[in-house]
Each structure stands twice: as C-alpha cells, then as structure tokens.
Amino acid sequence: MKYSTDIIINLYARSRTMSFAKRYKPVDIGIGAPNFAPPDFMREAFINVSLSPDYSVHQYTRSEGHPRLVKILSKIYSPLVNRELDPFDNFVVSIGATNSIFCALQSLTHDSDDEWIVFEPHWEHYTAMIKMAGAKVKEVPLKPKKDKYSSRDSPSSSDWTFDRKKLRKAFGKKTRGVVLNNPNNPTGKVFNREELTFIADLVEKWDAIALVDEVYEWLVYDRNQHIRFASLPGMFERTITVGAATKTYSVTGWRVGWAYGPAYLMNYMKKSIFGAIGDNVTPSQEAVAIGLERVWAERSRANSYLVKYPKKLQIKRDRLVSALCRAGFVTHVPESGYFLLANWTGMKSLPSYLVGNATDSKKDVEFVKYLVKEVGLEVYPGSPYFGEKHQSKGSDYVRVCFVKVRTRSV
Amino acid sequence: MLTRVPFLRAVQSQLLRNSTTEVINNYTTMSKFDLPDRFVGNDKSVWVEYIQLALQHKPVNLGQGFPNFHAPENVRKALANAALNENPLLNQYTRGFGHPRLVNAIAALYSKLLSRKLDPTTEVIVTAGAYEALYAAIQGHTSPGDEWIIIEPFFDCYEPMIRTAGGIPKFIPLKPTKNSGIISSGDWMYDKNEMASLFNKRTKGIILNTPHNPLGKVFTHDELSFIADLAKKWNTLVVSDEVYEWMVYKPHEHIRIATLPDMYERTITIGSAGKTFSVTGWKIGWAYGPANLLKNLQVVHQNSLYTCSTPIQEAVAVGFEEELKKFGQPDCYFTSLAEELLEKRDFMAKFLADVGMAPTIPEAGYFMVANWTQLEKNVNLDEEQDEYKDYRFTKWMTKNVGLQGIPPSAFYSKEHKHLGEDNVRYCFIKVIVN
C-alpha cells in the first residue's frame, strides 16, 4: 500500500462528524447536493432514455464520450471560449467532474519533483489527488482583506484574494500547473479579470498548465461575471477546463462530468481515463445530451433555465445569509456556487468549551457536533478545506450549503 | 477486389496514423507535457484500431463484446422509476462506497453464494464497472516493485493497470492440451510447475479470471486449489475477476475461489452489472472481500471517482432483489441468460467449423476462440502489414469477407504474443439464430 497515512486521515477526517450526525439525524446543510428533483426536462429525458426502444442506449458507447453529448458540448462551449471546438478532439467525458480532475492530474504528473499549486481553502480532494499522482502540493492561501470582521460588516466572498507576491514565489521550474476552482468552493468567490490575468501570466512564464474546475460556472449571482480561464489570451493551449451537469441541473447522482481543452492535452486525458474506468455511463450521457440540447435551443430566451435557476438559488442564499447573521455568524456572502463560509467564533452564548483556546485546530469539529446535537443542524467544519499550516485559521469557519434552503417559490 | 485493396490501405493508414504523435510534434516546445512514462503503452490500441476498422468497412462486427438486444424489462423500468420516483434523492449523490440499497442487495446475494455473512458497508464496494474495481484493487494494493501474476490470454487492461501502479507483471499462458477433435476451453491449462515457479516473496498477488475471457474456460476445483495453496504459501492476494459468473453452460459450474478453505481472507472478487444484466453501458461493478483488503480500494475510489450514478445503482439493486426472489428457478435471469446464449454458442461453433476453422468450445461467456490456420491458403495475408499473423488475418477478413473478429495476440504479453497468432476471437452474443 503506497498511500501515506495523511491521505487516509484526510479522507476520514470528515467522516467523524458524519457518523456523529447519523446518530442525531440533523437537517443536513453541509453536503453539496440538492434535496429536490432535477428540472422536469432533465427527468423526462432520463425516463425516456431508460425506456427507449433503442437497445443501444444501455450498452457501451464511445469510451471518450458519447457522440451525442460531446456534439452538444462543443456547440455550447465554442462561443464561450471564442473558438471552434471539435467534439471529438477537444472533449472528454468522465464519471463526474471528480474523475476528470483525477485523470488530468494523473496524466500530467511525471515524477515526485512535480509541483501543483492549489489555492486554499479548497475542495479537500484536490490535494489527495495530487499526492496520489505522486506530485507535491504547494498551497497559496486566499485570505479575506480584513483580519477580523464584525457581524455588521457583511463581507463578500470577493474579499478573499491571494497575495500576489506569494503566488509569484510559488511558481518555479518544478511547477507542473495550477489547480484553479472558479467559481470557488467553499468561499463562493468568482475570480476577477485582474486576478485571472495575474495567474495566466505566471502560467505562461513558467510553461505550466492550468487545471480549471468550473463546475459552478452557471451559478453566479448578483451582477458578477464568471470569466472562463481558457478564454484569456494564449491560455486555451495550456488549459484543461472541467465542467459537469451535476450542479447546474441538480443531477448530482447522474455522474456526468467533462473536460475540454487542446487536443494534445485531451489525448493524455483519454489515455488516463481509459486506464482507470474504461468507459462512461451511456444512459446518463444520452439523457444529459438531450437536456443540454434543449438548453441550447432556448439559449436566447429571457426565461431560460440558465437564467431562472441562479435567480432561485440567489433567493436561497439571501435567506441563509440573513438567518446566519441573525444567529451571530460573520457570513462571507458568496458570489456564486452552493456554499458559503461563516465564521462562528464571535457567536454569543456558546458553551464555554468552545470559547477561547484559539490554537485548537479541531474546535470547528466540536462546534459542528454541538450544532448537530443542540440545534439539529449539520454543517461542515471549515478546517478540512485548509492546508495543514492553516488548519486553525480554517477552524474559525464552517461551510454551509444553501441549495436546500426552503423558499416560498420553490 | 484487388483494385480496392491498395485504396483501402491508403485510407486505413490515413485513419490509423498516430494523431497523438502528430499533435505532440506541433508542441515540441511543450515537451515538458509529454505523456508520463507510466502511461506509455496504455493506449487502447487493439480497441481503438478495430473500432475504427469497423467504422470504415462496416463488417459484421463480432469484435467488441456487448449485446444487441434489450436489457431485461424490469431493470429498464427500474431505471425509469428511479428518475420518476417521488424521492428526489434518487437523482442526487449517494453513499460513495455504494448506494445502500445496492450494497445490501449485493451482500445478500453473495452471502448466500459464499455461505458467509458479508457486511454490506465494509465488505462490498460499488465501482464504475468491473474495470474501476480492477483499477482500484491494483492501484490500492501495489507498491513499486510488487509482482502480479497474470494468466494468458488475459483481458488486456490488466497489464497497463499493473505497470501504471509501479508493479511488475509476470505471465503464464494457458495452452491447449489437445490439437484435434472437439476442443473445449477446459482443454486449455496452465503448467503447474511453471505456476509454482512464478510465486516468490515479491509476489503481491495473482489475477484470476474465471469464467475466462476470451477462452470461456471455467477453472476447475483442482486448478483453483492449486492456485489457492500457492497464494497461501506465499501470502499473496487473489484478485478474482468473475464478471461472466452467470454465463456458464451446463454441466460446468463456476467455483468462486473465495469459497475455498481460508481463501476469503485473501481474495478480492469482482463482478459486473453490465454483464449480469446485459447493460454494458451502465458501468456498475463491484468488489467484495474482507474489510481490511477493501479499505485500499475505498481510498482509491474516493479520490478518483467519489461515487457512482445513483439512479443506475437503484435500478441494479431492484434487478438483484427481483432475481434473488426467483433464484434457482428457470425464469431467473441468472439461469435464463446462459440458456439463451447456449443456442448462439452452438450455432457459432458450427458455423466456424463449417468454414474450416477449429473453434474452442467455451464452457462459459460469450466469446469463442478459433484456430484459423486451415484457412491460411485461402486468404492473402501478404496484403496486410502487421507484425502478428492474427492481426493480418482479422484485418484481411474484415476488408474482404466482411466479418470482424479480434486478434488474440493482443491478450498476451509481448514475449508470448506468438501463442495467440493462430487464433481469432469472436463474440457470439450478437449472433441471431434463425
């Protein structure tokens, strides 16, 4: 067994609060999955595929991606990155975005000297995947502008940014690439053009690759604009962009993700995906393709799904933000995605064992247990999203998912 | 026909030109991003090549193995119901190591077959097809330098999976012990002395495939016991790929090596919903075995894939529950599938014998290996360029006769490829008997 214990510990860190939660059956607003059905047009597509008179929708299809799906993906993304994408050369489909990220890291890591730069806080699997590929992780922190906020501040996720000097120092000859999650989980940050250009210049300078996870690309709120990294000058040739049907269409359980980028990088992905899973799920791909064809057909309508759904989520976000503020959390209002980070340390009437002792990096776990037991709410502790050095900073936060919040209209 | 051939060859070389190399050459400045060494040779070569060949020549394609008939109606309906269900969570993430309803069903089935109570949460894991189960088992249990024994011919992904993980494959061929008369897949055997000599203290495990692809061999109790004793003697794992477990022709009987004395503790057994329910596109497989061995698979799975499709797992679970109720009865799919296939097998064997080949009659599965050398005088192998004769034969047949099979030398290690050259593999699941 070649995996070091820290990967395993990382894996099971969260399961400790999860098994605790099982005993108390709280309302789970931690995990990033909706508690409602997918939109009707997606469900109908899936049902029709299941009962299709065509037997082949239940059998193997093209391993690198079902032709019907990659064709509609190329239609959707070509205008978004200002270039004609070939459905077969520029796309691969994977079992969820997770598998695309895994396979990209596997196929681009050569040896144990290779380094991948990751912004923290980050989705906890990135670092485990980099280590499994045999490379080293270089974490660059995103930090809120102020050290301490009061509950009246109502900061935004855009307050979180990286120290330019630190990022410049992180890049070097050993850099394979940077893993960028934009829109970002767990902060909800949408990187702005200046930040992205700064990253792109370093990627170019050090002949690196950008692995950009954009699964929340359609869930952007207020007037914020998501800029696709691959659309920046010169970046398409060095970028693997990962997307998924998962979050946008509330089909987290269908497991359809994809990656797009230049043909030479997609060729590596294809080999790596073939080495790990061989093929994708045909009926899920066919159903997603049918759903996306409809989204494409209604793209110019003002009441299209891609316009309406983020508005619906924005209402949920606002409800959760105001509820958390009333409860005494300092909430960083997310510009996008499913999640937000809330600093709980300033809350009043916390039990004494949760107050003070600022060096305890596991106090968020205790706080989450307290919430589960006493309040009946399950959120995720913040520390697993931070690197080892910043665990105690991270434990000031909890990650809360607002996709399940009830609104009158939903 | 002769005028067509050079033309076809030109088209073909066009098609099969290695596009990767070409693209890489355009990016010489980015050589830093060449494919890492551990992936070199990880191409799907035979499949990419033969799928492309089939697209070009539109032969009767008996190459790749998947059904051209409907999956059982109950599982298709179960899939539609998962999306229709008033429980919206059937469209959302489920438990990463397997949807609870499915791991319960799998544990119930194999508890019965193994006469041992399997814990659904720790002794079963659901994966993206048997393929990912193999990947997770090999990745999760290989340290650099570990040796794995592979029995040839073998499902071609075993070797790159071991190499990618840093392991060293050691090969041992099954060889026909008979050259005339009716040859059964049971006549293909490994040499016991050779097998014993491959085990040593660096051996991490052996990959066993029973029922076997492509031969259709069902390993006997004696053959399995011999392997089991060596595995115990050298304290190694057994990864047992049993995806064809429900396609065994009477009177042969599939024996699970995990049921042999003291073998459960060292065996990871792999199964497939795609094969069990004729739904190759669903990509649901599983592994079962002792919790301490499955833990390594969980680590790989959690960080490479996280979780498999929920509605599909739900549908497979329903399929299992229904078949379990009918278990042992003639209308149980586990029984009826093999009976339907038997007719196709016999039809195929007769057809191949009639045209002058010598088929090995499979005891299981839906592939048939046939020796084609009696036809050598009738085909013009010089028209093809490949190194191995079976590649030349199958390509010539595709182009000139319109029948496509797979060259079995693809299922041997480099040093043993000549052992596969006299044969061709056909998949008979698509054959229509009338």
Image: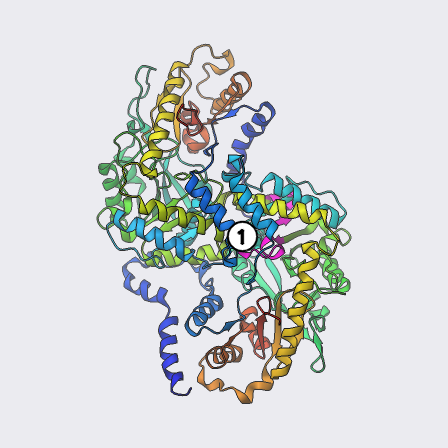
Q: Position of residue A372 (x, y in %)?
A: 53, 21
Q: Which residue is mark 1?
A: B283
Query: Within the image, what quadrant is residue B107 found in?
Result: top right
**Total numbered badges shown on the rendered structure:** 1
Q: Residues within 10 Å of mark 1 (few under 14, many from 20)?
A: many
Image quadrant occupied by the C terminus of chain B:
bottom right
Q: Secondary structure at mark 1?
A: loop
Q: Residue furthest bottom?
A: B377
Classify residue B414 as left or right of residue A116. right
Q: Position of residue B410 (x, y in %)?
A: 53, 70
Q: Amino acid at mark 1?
A: Lys
Circle 1 chain: B
Q: B108 and A286: which one is in front?
A: A286
User: Which of A114/A26 is in front?
Assistant: A26
**Taking B279 as reference, is A30 left or right?**
left
> Image point 46% across, 32% down: which residue?
A384
Q: Which residues are magenta?
A: B271-295
Residue B272 located within the stretch drawn in magenta: yes
The colour scheme used here is rainbow
Above or below, B386 against B298 in this view is below
The verdict on residue B322 being magenta is no
- Residue for point 35% across, 59% down: A89
Would residue A208 be seen by someone viewing this image from the given angle?
A: no
Asked whether residue B9 is in view, the answer is yes
